Amino acid sequence: MKYPVLLAYYITSLAIVLIPIPWWYYSVGGIFQIYDSPFQINLYFLGEKLIIAEILNILLNAVRIYVAINLIYGIILSIKGKNYRYSTMFWLPIFYIVDPIIIYLVVDFLVSKALGIPLNYPLVIIGKENLTTEYQGATIIMLIKSYPTFVFWLSLIPVIIYLVFLLVEKKKT
């Protein structure tokens, strides 16, 4: 077999794509909850699932199918000894590392700037953090939870394997 590391990347990536479990969990005081991955999202407000999540899941499942087809194609070509590179599953977990920063920018802009509510939202929250603000004379305390699930940590396996593949290929040249 000419590309065993690339084949391992495709197989582990396909396994991750097919696991229908969220990669990350967010909660704002338990009032608003998000369970998401690149292929699925569940949104809850006051314990009720929001319909918009179902619509988004149709699109995200289409992405899941597209990525899975490309990974299967990569597996077939790798077995045939061809160097087909499809790096989506390398980049998706990396984007999830950047995700808390994006949330910070959105919250900071929407709440602090657009609504004029002074809010000191931390740049990155992994775990639990109390967020306190003053609004119209009232103190508002929100428990923010944000953490990766086990599947997110599993999704880093293809990232590491792909990096190994790139290093092995670089040494060949």
Image (cartoon, rainbow, N blue to C red):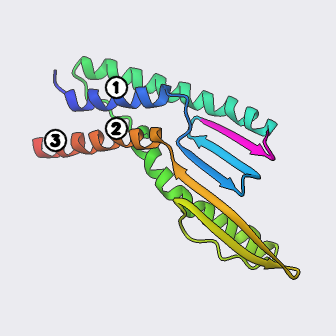
Of residues 68 and 135, the one drawn nearer to the viewer in this rendering: 135
Residue 138 image offset from top left, x and y in percent: 85, 78
CB within 8 Å, label 1 to label 2: no
In the image, residue 43 lies in the stretch drawn in magenta: yes
SS for callout 2: helix
Residue shown at 29% from the left, 44% from the top: 160
**Magenta: main secondary structure:** strand
Specify start and end residues of the magenta stretch as a single range: 40-49
Residue 119 image offset from top left, x and y in percent: 71, 76
- Residue under label 1, please give it: 11
Disc 3 crowd rating (10 Å Cα; few below 14, some 14-19, many 20+) is few
The answer for how far apart the CA atoms under marks 1 and 2 are is 9 Å
The tag on residue 168 is 3
For this view, does 48 lie left or right of residue 14?
Answer: right
- Residue under label 2, please give it: 158
Check disc 3 and give the amino acid type: Val
Check disc 1 and give the amino acid type: Ile
| Quarter that holds the N terminus | top left
Residue 26 image offset from top left, x and y in percent: 63, 52
* Label 2 or label 3, whichever comes before in sequence order: 2
The answer to which quarter of the image holds residue 40 is top right
The answer for how far apart the CA atoms under marks 3 and 1 are is 18 Å
Foreground mark, 3 or 1, reads 1
In the image, residue 2 lies in the stretch drawn in magenta: no
